[in-house]
Image (cartoon, rainbow, N blue to C red):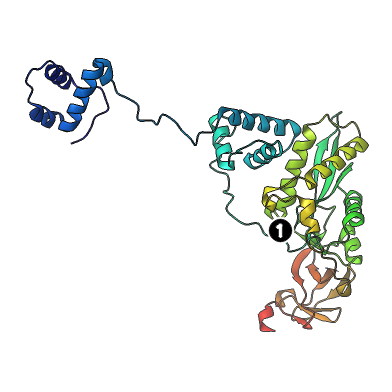
């Protein structure tokens, strides 16, 4: 038999009032018909005897106290911290809200999940069911300066003039190496950003960029001016695959953080004023704890490990060379035999190289692209056969 918490049926009410008045009631038959337990019936009879009909109204089963409930003052502090971070142009998710509450000296700071729950209940966080879950682990290089990511993005001055900001991020530490304001994305602006990074943090072993003309000529069959300058320093230049921005995901995500911080301030009226803002932003960003770094700030993460550097012993100059292929589709260059395949036999080719990276074109069509293995003279199409 089950207990009922809804309003009692008329038959049960009549039976309770009759029994309370001393009249005879067949309790067993009533409970069978109403699917009730006799002990429950007598419990309701006792409530009626003590408090009348009002005592029979359904009562809430909720506990009188909730020790785990977040105090209203803490909830208000969560909402206030989120607004303050938003006004400052800083990231304002649960992690950074919690860090702000800790920095402000609040006692019993709730967890990130609790902060998220309260923000969601107030409509300040909208569900994003299609957003990729943050359950994967990003690849990162093992040391500072092992790889820098470089990319340009645009901002607007106060008069709506569109300008470029070339940014550089250290892959290992997320350190913002440079944020350089320029008129446009070009070799000059990219090189200026890199030079400022070289002066402050030394030379990296590798530079990763997208396929923009300011950074790389790889997809156009050339070696860009920037790649030639980097090769002269022994720095390897690599690019992301076409239509695959995830490779440069750290710098792409950093653009969002920088733009949010800049947008929270009055727009700059000139490049010089914008550069002052960007310098202030770098100081803020590099010394702010980050969730992805285990609450360590980028500057400390960069300094915690000895930085890597270019392999100057393996430097090879960049350049290009025109030469014919053999009947079997092989070209000889720099003491190497690069196999293209018989389909490219007896053709005029142009080989471009930067360090160990080679690209061979026939009539502007890419015949082969490879990183040469200098332990072998013959660069076969299938290296496993060597």
Q: Is residue 270 above or below residue 55?
A: below
* Residue at the front extreme of this rendering: 50
Q: Is residue 243 left or right of residue 314?
A: left
Q: Which residue is mark 1?
A: 241
Q: What is the tally of numbered marks visible in this picture?
A: 1
Q: Residue at x 50, y 33 (%)?
A: 69
Q: Quadrant of residue 270?
A: top right
Q: Residue at x 79, y 74 (%)?
A: 347
Q: Could you tell me residue 12's position as x and y percent?
A: 16, 22
Which part of the image, by quadrant, shows the C terminus? bottom right
The answer to whether residue 330 is above or below residue 298 is below
User: Is residue 227 rendered to the left or right of residue 140?
Assistant: right
As rendered, which of 213 and 91 lies closer to the eye? Answer: 91
**Residue at position x 64%, y 42% from top?**
95
Residue 112 image offset from top left, x and y in percent: 59, 42
Which residue is drawn at the image coordinates 78% and 75% (left, top)?
A: 372
One can see residue 36 in this view: no
Q: Give how far across and how far down residue 5 sits, in percent.
A: 27, 28
Element under disc 1: loop
User: Would residue 372 be visible to someone looking at this image?
Assistant: yes
Give neighbour class at mark 1: few <14, some 14-19, many 20+ (Cα, 10 Å). Answer: some
Question: In front here: 250 or 292?
Answer: 292
Q: Quadrant of the N terminus?
A: top left
Q: Is residue 27 above or below residue 150?
A: above
Q: Position of residue 110 (x, y in %)?
A: 58, 39
- The quadrant where residue 275 appears: top right
Q: In terms of depth relative to the viewer, which is nearer, 185 or 263?
A: 263
Looking at this view, is 277 or 15 the one in front? 15
């Amino acid at each position: 038999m089950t207990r009922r918490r809804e309003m009692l049926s008329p038959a049960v009410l009549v039976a309770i009032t009759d029994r309370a008045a001393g009249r005879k009631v067949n309790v067993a038959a009533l409970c069978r018909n109403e699917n009730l337990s006799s002990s429950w019936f007598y419990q309701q009879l006792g409530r009626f005897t003590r408090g009348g009909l009002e005592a029979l109204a359904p009562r809430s089963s909720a506990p009188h106290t909730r020790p785990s409930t977040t105090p209203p003052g803490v909830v208000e502090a969560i909402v206030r911290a989120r607004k303050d971070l938003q006004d400052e142009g800083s990231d304002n998710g649960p992690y950074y809200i919690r860090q702000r509450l800790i920095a402000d000296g609040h006692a019993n700071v709730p967890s990130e999940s609790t902060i998220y729950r309260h923000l969601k209940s107030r409509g300040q966080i909208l569900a994003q069911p299609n957003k990729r879950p943050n359950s994967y682990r990003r690849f990162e290089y093992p040391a500072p300066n092992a790889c820098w990511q470089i990319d340009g993005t645009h901002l607007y001055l106060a008069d709506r003039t569109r300008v470029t900001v070339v940014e550089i991020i250290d892959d290992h530490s997320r350190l913002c190496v440079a944020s350089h304001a320029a008129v446009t994305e070009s070799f000059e602006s990219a090189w200026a950003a890199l030079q400022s990074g070289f002066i402050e943090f030394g030379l990296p072993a590798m530079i990763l960029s997208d396929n923009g003309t300011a950074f790389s000529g790889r997809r156009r069959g050339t070696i860009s001016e920037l790649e030639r300058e980097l090769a002269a320093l022994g720095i390897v230049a690599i690019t992301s695959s076409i239509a695959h921005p995830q490779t440069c995901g750290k710098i792409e995500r950093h653009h969002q953080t920088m733009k949010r911080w800049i947008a929270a301030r009055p727009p700059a009226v000139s490049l010089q004023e914008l550069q002052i803002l960007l310098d202030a932003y770098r100081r803020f960003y590099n010394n702010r704890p980050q969730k992805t770094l285990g609450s360590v700030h980028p500057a400390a993460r960069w300094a915690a490990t000895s930085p890597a550097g270019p392999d100057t012993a393996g430097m090879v100059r960049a350049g290009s060379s025109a030469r014919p292929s053999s009947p079997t589709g092989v070209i000889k260059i720099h003491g190497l035999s690069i196999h293209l395949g018989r389909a490219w036999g007896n053709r005029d080719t142009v080989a471009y190289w930067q360090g160990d990276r080679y690209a061979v074109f026939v009539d502007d069509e890419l015949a082969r692209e490879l990183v040469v293995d200098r332990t072998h003279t013959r660069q076969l199409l299938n290296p496993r056969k060597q």
